[in-house]
Amino acid sequence: MNRKHFLATILPASIAANALAQTKPHKNHQFHPDSYRDKNPQLMIPPYLKTGDTIGITSPAGYITLKDIEPAVAQITSWGFQVKIGDTIGKRDFTYGGTDAERLQDFQAMLDNHSIKAILCARGGYGAVRIIDNIDFTNFRKRPKWVIGFSDITVLHSHIHQQYNVATIHSKMCNSFPDDWSLADAEQKATILSIKDALQGTPMVYNAIPTAENVWGKAKGVLVGGNLKTLESLAASTSDIDTAGKILFVEDTGEYLYSIDRMFWNLQRSGKLKHLAGLIVGGFKIKEDLGGEPFGKTVYEIIKEKLEGYHYPVCFNFPVGHQRNNYALKCGIIHELDVAVDKVIFKDIIK
């Protein structure tokens, strides 16, 4: 089976069969092409990369050492690309990859350097929001390039989409590349290679294991989203995304169940769930409840409570987030989502 066109998570047959057996009929949401209207017809897709192109590596958020990015550099060069290492790599200002001024200057230099065709953020953590309002995107708008990363880099994905309507890549970063490629397992390799596929313009098609909690239906729309806590922190700012008519994906890690509940109430009360084309729920790593007091709802129950009255497809347990099966997704690109009792297919539509 061709990895470029089919990536799937795998469950033991007994678990998968049990999930299907428990699946209850949901009100089916069928996408009607005539009713779909692309709200952003001027979407800009940066040029896809070719052999010899340069990828810049910078750290607009947390700090990382030169040694930590060596596996990523080795892998990227093996793909036929060149690498430009930014000045923030190896710098540290407490938790940050250098001071705000240093991180801003380094990211700005990569945006303005026309020889750099893509910018790979070395890691997440925290810090992108501290510099986002001072980044000058003038040259970027004239010559867009791929910005790559996830977690705190959701700030960049959201801001670039909302303000400039340029596609970006949500994916693993340098700190997720295996130290020894020959020892990496198939899933780890596939997630890293999905970054290469996304950069080269390969059509991305993903399959996920159906779950009993999924809501069946088909949808088509521009893909937006990322880390849920980060999305919540951008509310009412110039980086806040408009979700109407789009497919939203969310993931998070290290949050209590009550925090997940609060963040989904924010999405619901702010109208971000009301006019979606579809919803994709990725990985959620939950902290133990404070004081041993159970919250009383699972992640599934928390989310489905906020979706009452809405009739669009919903996919749970999609392979994206702070986990090993975190595949590359092209934010800002039109996608199709097909959720059924026996399948989940998600693919981009490159134009």
Image (spheres, grey):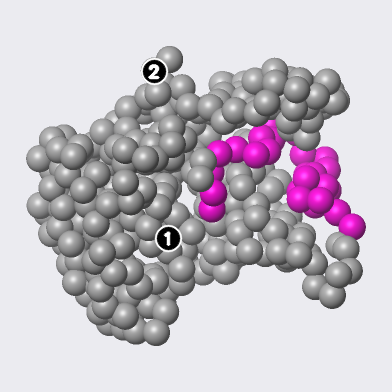
Task: Give left or right: position of 101 versus 287.
Answer: left
Q: Is residue 156 visible?
A: no
Q: Dominant secondary structure of the magenta stretch?
A: loop
Query: Residue 320 magenta-drawn?
Result: yes
The residue positioned 66% from the left and 35% from the top of the image is 315
Q: Quadrant of residue 81?
A: top left
Give the quarter of the figure containing the C terminus.
Answer: top left
* Farthest residue, direction top: 1
Question: Percent position (x, y) of residue 211?
Answer: 73, 30
Q: Which secondary structure, mark 2?
A: loop
Amino acid carrying label 1: it is Ile
Identify the magenta region: 296-323
* Farthest residue, direction front: 183
Q: Quadrant of residue 103?
A: bottom left
Task: Give the Cα distance between marks 1 and 2.
Answer: 30 Å
The residue positioned 54% from the left and 49% from the top of the image is 323
Observer-nearest of 181 and 265: 181
Question: Percent position (x, y) of residue 109?
Answer: 17, 67
Observer-nearest of 180 and 341: 180
The residue positioned 51% from the left and 45% from the top of the image is 324
Q: Which of the two discs, 1 and 2, labels the residue nearer the N terminus?
A: 2
Q: Determine whether label 1 and label 2 are within 8 Å by CB.
A: no
Residue beneath disc 1: 153
Query: Residue 264 magenta-drawn?
Result: no
Q: Is residue 63 visible?
A: yes
Residue beneath disc 2: 2
Q: Which secondary structure, mark 1?
A: helix
Amino acid carrying label 2: it is Asn
